[in-house]
Amino acid sequence: MNDLHVEIEPERIVTATLILRAWSPEDAPEALEIYGDSRTAEAVGLSQPVGDLEEMRGLLAQWDHQSSHSPLPQGRWAVESTDDGQLLGGASLLPFGPNDPQLVLGWHLRPGARGHGVAGQIGHALAHQAFVAGDVDEVFVAAPVRNTASLAVAKRLGMSRVTDLDWSHQGVQLEVLRLDREDLHKIRPGISLDDSYDPDGLGDW
């Protein structure tokens, strides 16, 4: 498998270095490191950070149920390393909102997983999921302007800024970028979809 290839399986999405799979109750301790963080909680729409393991297990069960009952290609996934099975973060491919059916890519990483190209791998894998497993022609990333790391990931994946979508989250205007099906592999210079890319200042990588 080369670093641009993604395998879409019935229960998993597999890249050269990552496996996106269903959430499990056993993921709770590591997941709490991610979703117990106030910034991550805000980004995924939680009213407050996850407080303890019991709450985390309940949320993971809710996400797994939602994912298993969502139409393809939508879902929520745990992201683990193919090397050692370590949980690195979470991923989502979901509509922006009830009145906005456009699918949005999401990634949320443990602090130790940032700075190593993981977010780029996740974004690329989710785009494959959208275009291969579903009848989708475009996907989006939406983030506040201050989230320079996520926006940088999106741009390096070949996504382009759009102005025809007026999206906001909790009163904050979002910058929206789009990737079309035909642009899937137009990755811009400077990206690496393996663990060798470590640019300064891009904390989500």
Image (cartoon, grey):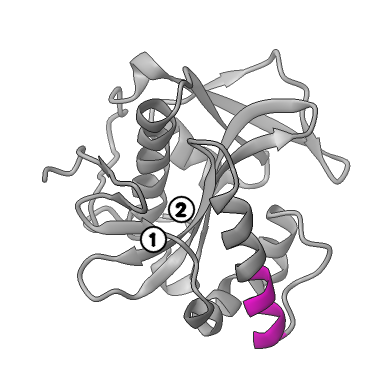
Provide the residue designation for mark 2.
202
Query: Label 2 neighbourhood size at 10 Å, few (<14), some (14-19), many (20+)?
Result: some
Q: Amino acid at mark 1?
A: Gly
Give amino acid for label 2: Leu
Residue drawn where x is 28% and y is 25% of the image: 185
Q: Residue at x 49, y 77 (%)?
A: 27
Residue at 68 percent of width and 55 percent of height: 44
- Percent coordinates x, y for residue 123 in the rendering: 42, 42
> Does residue 158 belong to the magenta stretch?
no
Residue that numbered label 1 is attached to: 115
Q: Position of residue 114 (x, y in %)?
A: 43, 63
In the rendered structure, which segment of residues is drawn in magenta? 52-59
Instruction: Judge by depth and name the residue closer to the eye, 191 or 43.
Output: 43
The answer to the question of whether label 2 and label 1 lie on touching residues, with beta carbons closer than 8 A, is yes
Q: Is residue 91 left or right of residue 168?
A: left
Q: Is residue 73 above or below residue 110?
A: above
